[in-house]
Amino acid sequence: QMQLVESGGGVVQPGRSLRLSCAASGFTLRNYAMHWVRQAPGKGLEWVAVVSYDGGSKYYAASVEGRFTISRDNSKNTLSLQMSSLRAEDTAVYYCAKDKAVASDGYFDLWGQGTLVTVSS
Amino acid sequence: QSALTQPRSVSGSPGQSVTISCTGTSSDVGKYKYVSWYQQHPGKAPKLLIYEVSERPSGVPDHFSGSKSDNTASLTISGLQADDEADYYCCAYAGRYSWLFGGGTRLTVL
Protein backbone atom coordinates (compact mmCIF):
# COMPACT_ATOMS: atom_id res chain seq x y z
CA GLN A 1 0.00 0.00 0.00
CA MET A 2 1.03 3.63 -0.36
CA GLN A 3 3.28 4.74 2.48
CA LEU A 4 5.50 7.59 3.58
CA VAL A 5 8.11 7.08 6.29
CA GLU A 6 10.00 10.02 7.76
CA SER A 7 13.35 9.83 9.52
CA GLY A 8 16.10 12.08 10.77
CA GLY A 9 14.43 13.84 13.67
CA GLY A 10 16.11 14.35 17.02
CA VAL A 11 17.39 16.90 19.48
CA VAL A 12 19.53 19.69 18.05
CA GLN A 13 20.99 22.87 19.49
CA PRO A 14 19.77 26.28 18.34
CA GLY A 15 21.66 27.49 15.29
CA ARG A 16 22.59 24.00 14.17
CA SER A 17 21.36 22.01 11.15
CA LEU A 18 19.38 18.84 10.63
CA ARG A 19 18.25 16.89 7.58
CA LEU A 20 14.96 15.05 7.43
CA SER A 21 14.17 12.32 4.93
CA CYS A 22 10.94 10.79 3.73
CA ALA A 23 10.84 7.43 1.95
CA ALA A 24 7.92 6.81 -0.36
CA SER A 25 6.60 3.41 -1.37
CA GLY A 26 3.55 1.95 -3.08
CA PHE A 27 3.21 4.78 -5.62
CA THR A 28 5.24 6.63 -8.23
CA LEU A 29 6.72 9.62 -6.43
CA ARG A 30 7.55 11.55 -9.61
CA ASN A 31 3.85 11.86 -10.42
CA TYR A 32 3.09 14.13 -7.47
CA ALA A 33 4.07 17.37 -5.81
CA MET A 34 5.26 16.80 -2.23
CA HIS A 35 5.05 18.91 0.91
CA TRP A 36 6.37 19.19 4.43
CA VAL A 37 3.90 20.15 7.16
CA ARG A 38 4.81 20.57 10.82
CA GLN A 39 2.98 20.57 14.14
CA ALA A 40 4.45 22.09 17.28
CA PRO A 41 3.68 20.14 20.48
CA GLY A 42 0.03 20.64 21.39
CA LYS A 43 -0.47 23.08 18.52
CA GLY A 44 -2.03 23.13 15.08
CA LEU A 45 -0.68 22.28 11.66
CA GLU A 46 1.62 24.61 9.71
CA TRP A 47 2.50 24.20 6.06
CA VAL A 48 6.28 24.42 5.59
CA ALA A 49 7.32 23.79 1.99
CA VAL A 50 6.38 22.27 -1.36
CA VAL A 51 8.41 20.85 -4.23
CA SER A 52 7.01 20.25 -7.69
CA TYR A 53 6.80 16.76 -9.17
CA ASP A 54 10.12 17.17 -10.97
CA GLY A 55 11.93 19.17 -8.30
CA GLY A 56 12.08 22.22 -10.54
CA SER A 57 9.97 24.50 -8.33
CA LYS A 58 10.18 24.98 -4.59
CA TYR A 59 8.25 27.27 -2.29
CA TYR A 60 8.44 27.93 1.43
CA ALA A 61 6.49 29.40 4.29
CA ALA A 62 7.78 32.80 5.33
CA SER A 63 8.77 31.37 8.72
CA VAL A 64 11.38 29.05 7.14
CA GLU A 65 12.32 30.87 3.92
CA GLY A 66 16.07 31.11 3.59
CA ARG A 67 16.75 28.53 6.32
CA PHE A 68 15.07 25.36 5.01
CA THR A 69 15.58 23.64 1.67
CA ILE A 70 13.21 21.03 0.25
CA SER A 71 14.45 18.56 -2.33
CA ARG A 72 13.53 15.24 -3.89
CA ASP A 73 15.20 12.32 -5.62
CA ASN A 74 12.59 10.59 -7.74
CA SER A 75 15.03 7.84 -8.71
CA LYS A 76 15.31 6.90 -5.03
CA ASN A 77 11.69 7.70 -4.10
CA THR A 78 12.80 10.09 -1.39
CA LEU A 79 11.94 13.59 -0.21
CA SER A 80 14.23 15.65 2.00
CA LEU A 81 14.15 18.77 4.14
CA GLN A 82 17.46 20.40 4.99
CA MET A 83 16.99 22.65 8.01
CA SER A 84 19.62 25.15 9.09
CA SER A 85 19.87 27.97 11.64
CA LEU A 86 17.33 26.11 13.71
CA ARG A 87 15.36 27.99 16.35
CA ALA A 88 13.39 26.89 19.37
CA GLU A 89 10.18 27.70 17.49
CA ASP A 90 11.07 25.09 14.87
CA THR A 91 10.42 22.39 17.48
CA ALA A 92 7.66 20.24 16.01
CA VAL A 93 6.64 16.95 14.51
CA TYR A 94 7.47 17.17 10.83
CA TYR A 95 5.24 15.32 8.38
CA CYS A 96 5.91 14.69 4.74
CA ALA A 97 2.70 14.73 2.75
CA LYS A 98 1.81 13.74 -0.79
CA ASP A 99 -0.20 16.15 -2.91
CA LYS A 100 -3.31 14.66 -4.47
CA ALA A 101 -2.18 15.81 -7.91
CA VAL A 102 0.91 16.34 -10.01
CA ALA A 103 0.24 20.06 -9.66
CA SER A 104 0.51 21.63 -6.25
CA ASP A 105 -3.17 21.78 -5.38
CA GLY A 106 -2.36 21.53 -1.71
CA TYR A 107 -4.60 18.56 -0.97
CA PHE A 108 -2.52 16.33 1.27
CA ASP A 109 -3.95 12.87 0.70
CA LEU A 110 -1.16 10.75 2.18
CA TRP A 111 0.86 11.54 5.31
CA GLY A 112 3.80 9.92 7.01
CA GLN A 113 3.82 9.15 10.71
CA GLY A 114 5.95 12.20 11.43
CA THR A 115 9.38 12.73 12.94
CA LEU A 116 9.97 14.90 16.01
CA VAL A 117 12.52 17.70 15.87
CA THR A 118 13.42 19.32 19.19
CA VAL A 119 15.55 22.44 19.14
CA SER A 120 17.03 22.97 22.58
CA SER A 121 20.32 23.75 24.22
CA GLN B 1 -0.54 35.73 6.70
CA SER B 2 -2.50 34.64 9.76
CA ALA B 3 -3.92 31.22 10.40
CA LEU B 4 -7.52 30.63 9.42
CA THR B 5 -9.98 31.00 12.29
CA GLN B 6 -11.76 27.95 13.65
CA PRO B 7 -13.70 27.48 16.90
CA ARG B 8 -11.49 25.83 19.47
CA SER B 9 -14.07 23.22 20.33
CA VAL B 10 -17.48 21.89 19.37
CA SER B 11 -19.52 19.04 20.76
CA GLY B 12 -22.55 16.96 19.95
CA SER B 13 -24.34 13.79 20.92
CA PRO B 14 -24.28 10.60 18.86
CA GLY B 15 -26.58 10.90 15.87
CA GLN B 16 -26.60 14.70 15.91
CA SER B 17 -24.97 17.01 13.38
CA VAL B 18 -22.26 19.55 14.02
CA THR B 19 -20.74 22.21 11.79
CA ILE B 20 -17.20 23.55 12.10
CA SER B 21 -16.49 26.92 10.55
CA CYS B 22 -13.24 28.13 9.05
CA THR B 23 -12.96 31.85 8.45
CA GLY B 24 -10.33 33.38 6.25
CA THR B 25 -10.15 36.42 4.02
CA SER B 26 -10.83 37.44 0.44
CA SER B 27 -7.19 36.52 -0.29
CA ASP B 28 -7.49 32.87 0.65
CA VAL B 29 -10.78 31.11 1.47
CA GLY B 30 -12.80 33.69 -0.41
CA LYS B 31 -10.60 33.74 -3.51
CA TYR B 32 -9.78 30.13 -4.35
CA LYS B 33 -11.54 26.76 -4.56
CA TYR B 34 -8.56 25.07 -2.88
CA VAL B 35 -10.08 24.44 0.54
CA SER B 36 -9.60 21.14 2.33
CA TRP B 37 -10.38 19.55 5.69
CA TYR B 38 -8.38 17.09 7.78
CA GLN B 39 -9.20 14.83 10.71
CA GLN B 40 -6.53 14.04 13.27
CA HIS B 41 -6.93 11.53 16.07
CA PRO B 42 -4.56 11.89 19.06
CA GLY B 43 -1.05 10.74 18.26
CA LYS B 44 -1.90 10.06 14.63
CA ALA B 45 -1.18 11.74 11.33
CA PRO B 46 -3.91 13.89 9.79
CA LYS B 47 -6.29 12.35 7.25
CA LEU B 48 -7.80 14.13 4.25
CA LEU B 49 -11.58 14.35 4.59
CA ILE B 50 -12.63 16.99 2.06
CA TYR B 51 -10.86 18.68 -0.84
CA GLU B 52 -11.84 21.38 -3.32
CA VAL B 53 -14.39 22.73 -0.80
CA SER B 54 -16.84 19.82 -0.98
CA GLU B 55 -15.28 16.78 -2.64
CA ARG B 56 -14.73 13.58 -0.67
CA PRO B 57 -11.80 11.25 -1.39
CA SER B 58 -12.73 7.64 -1.92
CA GLY B 59 -13.20 5.85 1.38
CA VAL B 60 -14.39 8.90 3.32
CA PRO B 61 -17.94 8.35 4.60
CA ASP B 62 -20.66 10.59 3.20
CA HIS B 63 -21.62 11.89 6.64
CA PHE B 64 -18.76 14.34 6.15
CA SER B 65 -19.60 17.27 3.88
CA GLY B 66 -18.06 20.62 3.05
CA SER B 67 -19.23 23.97 1.77
CA LYS B 68 -18.07 27.55 1.38
CA SER B 69 -19.70 30.96 1.44
CA ASP B 70 -17.66 34.09 0.88
CA ASN B 71 -14.68 33.96 3.23
CA THR B 72 -15.95 31.10 5.39
CA ALA B 73 -15.70 27.39 4.73
CA SER B 74 -17.64 24.84 6.74
CA LEU B 75 -17.37 21.16 7.56
CA THR B 76 -20.57 19.41 8.57
CA ILE B 77 -20.55 16.05 10.27
CA SER B 78 -23.96 14.44 10.34
CA GLY B 79 -24.98 11.38 12.33
CA LEU B 80 -22.16 11.81 14.83
CA GLN B 81 -20.34 8.65 15.83
CA ALA B 82 -17.94 8.03 18.69
CA ASP B 83 -15.04 7.63 16.28
CA ASP B 84 -15.63 11.15 14.94
CA GLU B 85 -14.14 12.52 18.16
CA ALA B 86 -10.91 14.11 16.95
CA ASP B 87 -9.26 17.37 15.96
CA TYR B 88 -10.32 18.93 12.66
CA TYR B 89 -8.28 21.35 10.57
CA CYS B 90 -9.19 23.40 7.54
CA CYS B 91 -6.61 24.41 4.97
CA ALA B 92 -6.78 26.96 2.18
CA TYR B 93 -4.53 28.13 -0.63
CA ALA B 94 -3.31 31.64 0.08
CA GLY B 95 -1.69 32.42 -3.25
CA ARG B 96 1.94 32.46 -4.37
CA TYR B 97 2.27 28.75 -3.59
CA SER B 98 1.52 29.01 0.10
CA TRP B 99 -1.12 27.35 2.22
CA LEU B 100 -2.74 28.29 5.51
CA PHE B 101 -4.20 25.96 8.11
CA GLY B 102 -6.82 26.79 10.68
CA GLY B 103 -5.96 26.58 14.34
CA GLY B 104 -7.91 23.37 14.71
CA THR B 105 -11.21 22.40 16.34
CA ARG B 106 -11.57 19.69 18.96
CA LEU B 107 -14.79 17.72 18.42
CA THR B 108 -16.18 16.00 21.50
CA VAL B 109 -18.88 13.38 21.09
CA LEU B 110 -20.91 13.52 24.28
Image (cartoon, coloured by chain):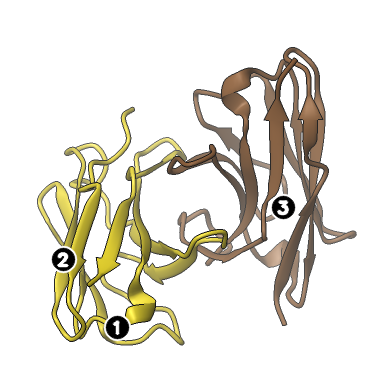
Tell me: A29 left or right of B16: right
- Distance CA(mark 3)–CA(mark 1): 41 Å
Q: Earlier in the sequence, mark 2 or mark 1?
A: 2
Identify the residue at horizontal 47%, vertical 65% (top origin). Answer: B41
Q: Chain of mark 2?
A: B
Identify the residue at horizontal 31%, vertical 56% (top origin). Answer: B106
Crowd tier of the residue under label 3, counting other residues whose Cα lies within 10 Å: few below 14, some 14–19, many 20 or above: some
Crowd tier of the residue under label 1, counting other residues whose Cα lies within 10 Å: few below 14, some 14–19, many 20 or above: some
**Circle 1 — which element?**
loop
Q: Chain of mark 3?
A: A
Query: What color is chain A drawn in?
Result: brown
**Residue depth check, mark 2 versus mark 3: number of the one nearer the observer:** 2
Which residue is denoted by mark 3 in the rendering? A54
- Which chain comes out yellow in the rendered image? B
Callout 3 amino acid: Asp
Q: Quadrant of the N terminus of chain A?
A: bottom right
Q: Chain of mark 1?
A: B
